Image (tube, rainbow, N blue to C red):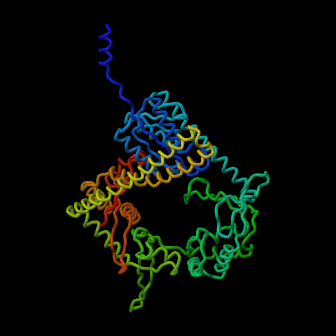
Amino acid sequence: MHLSNEYNKLAQPIEKKKKAAIYARVSTVEQAEEGYSIDEQVRLLREFCKKEGYEVCGEYVDRGISGKNISGRPALQQLLSAAHNKEFDIVLVWKMNRFSRKSIDLLNIVEMLKTKNIGFRSYTEKYETESPSGKLQFQMMAAISEFERANISENVKMGMLARARAGYWNGGKVLGYDIDSTEVDDRNRAASKLVINEDEGQTVRKIFDLYTGGFGYKSIAGQLNRAGHQTKRKKSFSINSVKQILQNPLYVGIIRFNVRRDWTEKRRNNINPDPVMEKGKHVPLISQDTWDQTLAIMKSRGGRPNRIHSGEHPLTGIIRCPVCNSGMVLSRTTNKTKDGTKRVLEYYVCGAWKNKGSTVCRSNGVRVNYADEYVLTKIANVANNDRLIKSIVLKINSEREKNRSPLQNDYKRLEKAIDSVQLRKDKILGLFEEGIVEKDDLIGRLATLNEEIAGLEERKAPIKSKMWQDDTIEVNFTLVKDVMDSFTKMFKESLSREQRKHLLHLLINKITISESREIDSIKIQLNKEVVKHFTTPEGERSSDDDDLSPSFTVFLEL
């Protein structure tokens, strides 16, 4: 009987350990103000895995990155890629909002994990998604969390509206003023007050004086730049920066707030027709007469807007100035022929020169007809030349292989340095346990070592992302051929110039020109958006899995 029991034990299959992936994230603000640090999140999750009998097969960490958008987080993208390859059985997070603040993103990620038979668990919210009841609880918690965040956001907005109506400044840095946060409002709460910065105030007054004296935006920007004036961010003045100052009622003593109806979005179509306009607590920089005169001039010039021609010309923005690398924009000149008729010539010119004047750069103009025809012909020639595509693919893969070894060496060196600092942490903890090191000394030395590890991790993250990116996508002849053929076909079938411009901007990353003003190189970009757009039939395109598919970017130089 005893032998039979032993035999049965041996005959039973050994239960395989579940493989777990740990994900941790903290934004810059959270890192500074609240919550657990990255290291603490990872430590707690490791302990949880040990307790549950999970094998940690991967740790994915995004440091100092907001949870607003999941597509901009390299570690999360790596985790999703590993999930597609079924490299683990469960994903663990300290808190579900580490994945995303949006319930729709959370639900999409968990649903994708479910299709791969991968579970999801949160350390602080005690539920799981492997069972129907656990999944229901997760969905309810995700919705409640998003509601709470929206409610907090709305309360903050209401507070800011109240301060604006009381004449206090809610904005950030503004030219002409410094911010004094020692001021308190009527309810004895902290309120930002604007104090005149005399040096910058002279610049603001000069802008209004020049404008009311008859000068246009570009002329003013040029004069300011030649005289050495700078914006609040210590940059050269542009047409737009001059215009924004002239349109800002702050300088006449008025607080303007809630200009956009949806304050979390920066879009052009959500302008509030009735923003808050209240007399401010700050001292004006210009008089009411100057402000009224400025508005009158703007109104009189309303039919003749002073703007850069963006036009429908397809290469604006992606063709680059050979001197300063700014995007080039459209410029038109009118010449008279011998018979007296007028002839309009179009050029791509340096955007910095067009926007800020000759003190920043020169025009470096390239004829539009030449540039458009050259680029389109070059792309068509590549699409129709299989041998050329093969040589481009071979060159790309050779360069990627050549660059892989230095990246791996850098990564290993940083990992070794992190291990070394970790050993020093363990040693100091050991000395504390033995009573050799005092608690205050321990805390200070651990803080220094943690900062050192965080710095090394920050240096390691982009290297890891690049290594992962190189391993994620295989650049082959078929992929490049399909994209180029599809682009050529779609470009020919486009009904409008705006559609053709969109296709070119999607495919081309940058066009450089030489000092002799001829096209030097055309850099094609292949990423998941481009590949999906040009290789998926239009009726089958969906944005549902855009953020969940692995990210990559590869450049082809023609």
* Residue 374 at x, y percent in the picture: 31, 73
Q: Is residue 85 above or below residue 333?
A: above
Q: Is residue 393 above or below residue 13?
A: below
* Residue 47 at x, y percent in the picture: 49, 34
Q: Residue at x 73, y 59 (%)?
A: 168
Q: Residue at x 53, y 76 (%)?
A: 356
Image quarter of residue 242: bottom right
Along the line of sight, which residue is nearer the eye, 533 or 452?
452
Which quarter of the figure is the C terminus placed in? Answer: bottom left
Label total for image: 0
Q: Residue at x 29, y 56 (%)?
A: 401
* 300 relative to 131 in the view: left or right: right
Which quarter of the figure is the N terminus placed in? Answer: top left
From this viewpoint, which residue is outermost toward the left?
Answer: 387
* 468 relative to 102 in the view: left or right: left
Along the line of sight, which residue is nearer the eye, 221 or 311?
221
Along the line of sight, which residue is nearer the eye, 125 or 507?
125
* Residue 347 at x, y percent in the picture: 41, 78
Image quarter of residue 81: top left
* Residue 491 at x, y percent in the picture: 33, 62
From this viewpoint, which residue is outermost toward the bottom?
Answer: 338
From this viewpoint, which residue is outermost toward the top?
Answer: 1
